[in-house]
Amino acid sequence: MGDWLAPDLLFDGDTLRAGMALWVVDGQVAAIAPVLPGARRIKGTLTPGYVDLQVNGGGGVLLNQTPTAAGMAAIAAAHRRFGTVAILPTLITDAPDVLDRAADAALAQHGKGGVAGIHIEGPHISVARRGTHAERFVRPLDARTMAVVARLRAAGVPVMITLAPEAVAPGQIAALVGLGAVVSLGHSDTTAAAVRAALAEGAGCFTHLFNAMSPLLHRAPGVVGAALNSAVPAGIICDGIHVADELVGLAIRARPGPDLMFLVSDAMPTVGGPDRFRLYDMDLHLENGRLVNDEGSLAGAHVTMAESVARLIGVVGVAPLAALRMAVTIPARVMRLPLLAQVVGRPCTDILQLDGDWRVAGTLSGLVAGQSAV
């Protein structure tokens, strides 16, 4: 009929509680209730699986190189092995036909295998802050991209689009928001005033805070300063490389309210794959945990959401509840996908078991089967 399992702690997408049990029926969580006699005790913490809104690749697959439904499925499968159950496959700046193919893939794969939508990161960005994005593809926001977003949204596919305020005309951000897209500001060299104007049009997010944006200076707050002072969420990479651990903690404390920071991996194909891959005409490889090009410049991230959560708690010093909300609740809220931050109604494969060091030890499906590994 079912099985009651009582973990040491349960993160239900809202709070972290002791003394609660999950009722599992036919491989799915049917209910949550206070622990009753007879419930099977489970070590560690149970939590909904992680939600990553910026995933360039995984399992040896880069979306830009393989903008297909199969490519998206392979990337999602690679990250699921490490506890991420929902992703936005992310296409960085590229030719218009590559974006068209990625949109076709998102239409075909949406809702399957953990593909929750698509993140279009560029090409409407600043050349000065393009990072590893190819300059030859950078261009102002145009009707072709607007049509792609409209097509995706008409089919109900969640869309995040990263752009720079200086790459759009007045009213274009509002038009994207009107289509139901989440406009995220990033790869920008603009002023705080321009950011505030973009926020007034409805931009609702910032892309990998600190990276690829004008910095915070005492007389020129830039994109970073405007982001920290705003009331909209910002993604951040917590790998100890892209942003110093001290600055991750400082950014969280500097925001004007809670739940305004969330984790992203910005992962490349090396997660769950070989230690090198090709992007555009560049060869990228892992070197001492860093992804670099042949010149030794940083080029993408090699980290999982699971590693980021453990680092956020163990190194940065963020409270476990806040860290789990940054990996589950807030990204789900940003994309208006509340089910991803719930436990009840989810398959056991979507519920993680975390050990005492907040690392992924398995899934609820493994526990039901009497196992302990992912």
Image (spheres, rainbow, N blue to C red):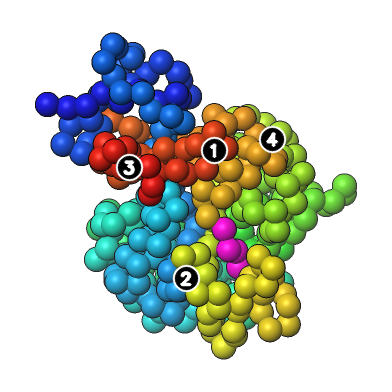
| Badge 4 amino acid | Gly
Q: Which residue is mark 2?
A: 273
Q: Which residues are magenta?
A: 299-303
- SS assignment at label 4: loop
Q: Which residue is mark 3?
A: 371
Asked whether disc 2 touches disc 4, contact meaning CB atoms under 8 Å apart, the reply is: no
Compare marks 1 and 3 and give the one earlier in the sequence.
1
Label 1 environment density (alpha carbons within 10 Å; few <14, some 14–19, many ≥20):
many
Residue 17 falls left or right of residue 191: left
Q: Nearer the viewer, mark 2 or mark 4?
A: 2
Q: CA distance from mark 2 to mark 4?
A: 30 Å
User: Exactly how many numbered labels are in the figure?
Assistant: 4
Question: Can residue 20 be found in the magenta stretch?
Answer: no
Give coordinates of residue 128: x percent, y percent.
71, 72
Q: Which residue is mark 1?
A: 358
Residue 168 falls left or right of residue 4: right
Q: CA distance from mark 2 to mark 3?
A: 25 Å
Asked whether disc 1 touches disc 2, contact meaning CB atoms under 8 Å apart, the reply is: no
